[in-house]
Image (cartoon, rainbow, N blue to C red):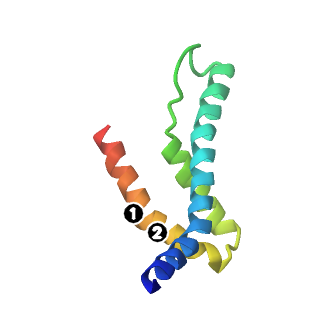
Amino acid sequence: MGETNKSKGIISELVPGLLICVFVMFLGIYGAELIGYLMIKAGFLSEGSGTPVSGIFVAIIIGVLIRNTIPLSPVFQKGIGFSLKYALRAGIVLLGLR
């Protein structure tokens, strides 16, 4: 019974930071698409072209901007740390495999 409560406590400590990271991930994906769309409308790319900017790159830039401009509550630290240690590294490996 104690082990179950301990795992629930760890998960509840990770969730707030993970949610912020998922939000930044979606911002990166849609931000990259927006950049591609704007480049097509500005005439830098031909119609039907895909965006030349990676969503991962945009998400990393957004994360750096957030981290250096907005003070985050300690509630988010464990989830963000987990994302940096495991999820980001796994994503970079998978991007390299692509």
Image quarter where the C terminus lies is: top left
From this viewpoint, which residue is outermost toward the top?
Answer: 47
Figure check: 7 above or below 21:
below
> Dot 1 corresponds to which residue?
86
Pinpoint residue 57: horizontal percent, then vertical percent: 50, 47
Figure check: 69 above or below 96:
below
Residue at image point 57% right, 73% down: 12
> Dot 2 corresponds to which residue?
82
Pinpoint residue 89: horizontal percent, then vertical percent: 37, 58
Q: In this view, does 35 lie to the left or right of 98?
A: right
Can you tell which quarter of the image residue 88 is in? bottom left
Q: In this view, does 2 lie to the left or right of 13?
A: left
Q: In the structure shown, which secondary structural element does the residue marked by tag 1 occupy?
A: helix
**Three-letter amino acid code at the position of disc 1:** Tyr
Pinpoint residue 58: horizontal percent, then vertical percent: 56, 46
For the image, the number of numbered tags is 2
Figure check: 30 above or below 17:
above
Pinpoint residue 46: horizontal percent, then vertical percent: 56, 14
Asked whether the beta carbons under mark 1 and mark 2 sit within 8 Å of each other, the answer is yes
Q: In the structure shown, which secondary structural element does the residue marked by tag 2 occupy?
A: helix
Q: Name the foreground residue: 8 vs 48.
A: 8
Figure check: 8 above or below 59:
below
Residue at image point 63% right, 21% down: 40
